[in-house]
């Protein structure tokens, strides 16, 4: 910038930490962080300049958000197969290998069926694993996967294929942090497009969605503890493997109208949420 005496570079790391570098006078306007010190993941950065060395600084607008990716030594297969024989894509995100679609398996890893088709009363009173397709429709199962209560997550017979598991809260947090942190990760994790435009499966506006991560998160909705269902194409909710109390567990997700990916520890275990598996 002509006459500029100070330039401020801002880099938002995968951890969500904002680094600020002031460059004054003739110092080269380059901010360098060796890849050796950066964990694998997608990094988000912007540039903003100030055209004065003293207040008021009159900063310019920040540049458009841009990204770069640090690779991982982890190997990730192209796909994985569940106990029903259904094949899912796998996607490498930072130092983690994730299932690229929501789980839709109807039996535990030992072949025992997971109860499904429960009415409102049966779902509300269940203290055992159960699943449901949104509105009971097979087409919703195929697109969005099944909704499982947390008792299915906790069942020792297992939901995920061998070598995979339901992610812990810490593993979900690592994913969110690798995509810019809580305030930005929803954009990087959501599939793009909208129902109204005929370009996707989220409702408008599907704020900020880029799917730069390849996670391809969808709004699969959820089932309430009383058995009612809600928010298909508006909200995606996923379980973690972490129970909090005898009645609650960790879960979280993302929404159609913001770029956040928020998590909470107080979900009733009778909720029906989606599940993604992660490689051991």
Image: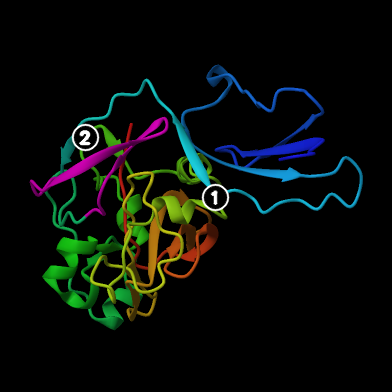
Q: Quadrant of the C terminus?
A: top left
Using the image, determine if residue 178 lies above or below residue 32: below
- What residue span does the magenta drawing correspond to? 83-103
Give x and y (percent) for residue 24: 81, 30
Q: Residue at x 50, y 65 (%)?
A: 258
Q: Is residue 181 magenta?
A: no
Q: Where residue 187 appears, x then y in whole percent?
A: 45, 55
| SS for callout 1 | loop
Find residue 64 and name its label: 1
State the residue in front, 231 or 213: 213
Q: What residue is at 91 percent from the left and 44 percent from the top?
A: 54
Left or right of 218: which side holds 54?
right
Q: Locate residue 6, reporting x and y percent.
A: 80, 36
Residue 110 placement: quadrant:
top left
Dot 1 crowding, Cα within 10 Å, few <14, some 14–19, many 20+: few
Quadrant that contains the N terminus = top right
Residue 122 sits above or below residue 280 on the image: below
Q: Residue at x 47, y 28 (%)?
A: 40
Q: Which of these two is toward me, 243 or 95?
A: 95
**Residue 95 lies in the magenta stretch:** yes
Query: Which one is in front, 278 or 196?
Result: 196
Q: Is residue 214 left or right of residue 116?
A: right
Residue density around tag 2, few if under 14, some if 14–19, many if 20 or more, within 10 Å? some
**First in sequence: mark 1 or mark 2?**
1
Dot in front, 1 or 2: 1
Secondary structure under tag 2 reads loop
Q: Residue 98: x percent and y percent?
A: 32, 40
Q: How are the colours assigned in the image?
A: rainbow
Identify the mark at residue 162; answer none if there is no mark: 2
Residue 7 visible in rendering: yes
Q: Hey, which residue is sitting farthest right in the picture?
A: 54
């Amino acid at each position: 910038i002509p006459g500029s005496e100070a330039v401020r570079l801002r880099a938002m790391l995968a951890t969500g930490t904002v680094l600020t570098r002031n460059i004054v006078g003739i110092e080269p306007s380059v901010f360098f962080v060796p890849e050796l010190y950066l964990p694998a993941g997608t990094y988000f950065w912007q540039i903003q300049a100030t055209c004065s060395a003293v207040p008021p600084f009159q900063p310019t607008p920040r540049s458009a958000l841009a990204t770069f990716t640090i690779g991982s030594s982890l190997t990730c297969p192209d796909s994985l197969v569940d106990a029903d024989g259904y094949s899912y894509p796998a996607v490498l995100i930072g130092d983690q290998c994730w299932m690229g679609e929501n789980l839709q398996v109807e039996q535990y890893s030992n072949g025992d069926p997971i109860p499904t088709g429960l009415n409102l009363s049966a779902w509300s009173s269940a203290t055992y694993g159960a699943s449901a397709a949104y509105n009971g429709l097979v087409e919703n199962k195929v697109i969005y996967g099944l909704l499982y209560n947390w008792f299915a997550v906790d069942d020792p017979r297992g939901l995920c294929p061998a070598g995979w598991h339901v992610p812990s809260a810490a593993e979900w947090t690592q994913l969110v942090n690798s995509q810019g942190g809580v305030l930005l990760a929803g954009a990087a994790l959501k599939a793009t497009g909208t129902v109204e435009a005929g370009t996707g499966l989220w409702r408008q506006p599907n704020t900020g969605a880029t799917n730069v991560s390849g996670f391809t998160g969808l709004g699969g909705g959820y089932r309430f503890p009383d058995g009612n269902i809600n928010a298909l194409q508006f909200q995606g909710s996923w379980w973690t493997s972490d129970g909090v109390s005898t009645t609650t567990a960790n879960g979280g997700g993302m929404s159609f109208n913001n770029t956040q990916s928020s998590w909470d520890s107080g979900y009733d275990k009778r909720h029906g949420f989606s599940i993604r598996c992660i490689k051991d």
